[in-house]
Amino acid sequence: MPEASTNDDQIRGMAMALRHWFEVTETNDLMVAAGLRGGKSEGLFTRKAPDKRFHALTLTALPPQVVRLKADAPMTTLHLLQDVYDDGELRADPWRWWFAWIGIEMTARLGPDITGARVREFIKTNESLGAIRVNAARWLASNPVRVTILEREFGQLVDRVIADGGDRLTIEGIIRQPALTIVDAMAGEAARLSAAITERLAERTK
C-alpha cells in the first residue's frame, strides 16, 4: 500500500477516535429545556408554553447544534483542537466548535482535508445548511472580531477586482450582495479550521 494512502487512513482513524469525544446537542432542544421555546405536542399533552418575557432570546446567534468536548476527554484532544480555542484572532466560540465537528466528521468519512476546500464547499452548497446561509448574519453577530475580519476581507476583495480591471458594475455587484460575502467568509473560517485540524492529525501520524 502506498505510504500516502496509509497516512490518510491513519488520519481518518484518528478523526474517528476524536469525534467520539464530542458531545452534540440540538440548540433548539436546549432552548426548549430552558423554557425559551415551546416543545412539540406529545399525544394529548403539550409541554409548558415558553415564558413570553424571553421571546426575544429565541433569535439566537448560536449554530443549529451546540458542540463541546465531553468532560472525560483525554488531554491529547487539547493539542489536536487548540486551533479551535485560539487561531490568533478568534478564540473559541460555539460556531468554531460546530465547524470543527463538521470538519472532523468529514475527515473521518472521506479522509484528510488538507486545504479545507471540502468543508468550504460543504458550507457554501450543502442543501441541509440552506437556513444557515440565509441567516449567516447570526454567525457574524456571534463574535465582534468577525466584523473586523470580514471588513478586511471585503476590502481585499474589492481591491482585487479593481486591480484585475473590474468595471464599476462588478464592484457594485459585490457591494449589493453582502449576504454572499458573509457566507463566503463563514465558509472560509470553517475551511481554515478544518485544514488546521487535519494538520494537527497529520503531525500525530509522523
Image (cartoon, helix red, strand yellow):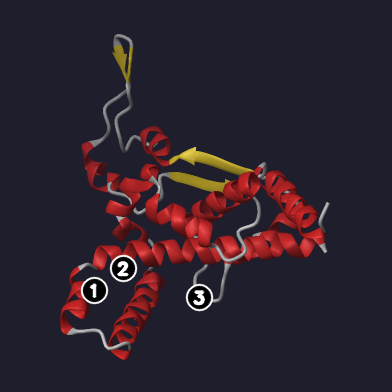
Q: Quick check: can you spot residue 79? A: no
Q: Which residue is mark 2?
A: 181
Residue 30 x %, y %: 42, 38
Residue 161 x %, y %: 30, 83
Q: Which residue is mark 3?
A: 89
Q: Determine the image quadrant of residue 162.
A: bottom left
Kind of element beneath mark 3? loop
The amino acid sitting under disc 3 is Glu
Residue 26 vs residue 134: left or right?
right
Checking the image for residue 174, the label placed there is 1
Pick the front one: 72 or 134: 134
CA distance for labels 1 and 2: 8 Å
The amino acid sitting under disc 2 is Thr
| Residue at horizontal 33 percent and vertical 27 percent from the top | 39
Contact flag, marks 2 and 3 (Cβ < 8 Å): no
Quarter of the C terminus within the rendering: bottom right
| Residue at horizontal 72 percent and vertical 45 percent from the top | 17
Pick the front one: 108 or 62: 108
In front: label 2 or label 3: 2
The amino acid sitting under disc 1 is Ile
CA distance for labels 2 and 3: 19 Å
CA distance for labels 3 and 1: 25 Å
| Residue at horizontal 63 percent and vertical 61 percent from the top | 197
Checking the image for residue 135, the label placed there is none
Residue neighbourhood size for the residue with mark 2, other residues' Cα within 10 Å, grouped as few (<14), some (14–19), many (≥20): some
In front: label 3 or label 1: 1
Residue 153 x %, y %: 37, 78
Picture mark count? 3
Contact flag, marks 1 and 2 (Cβ < 8 Å): yes
Contact flag, marks 3 and 1 (Cβ < 8 Å): no
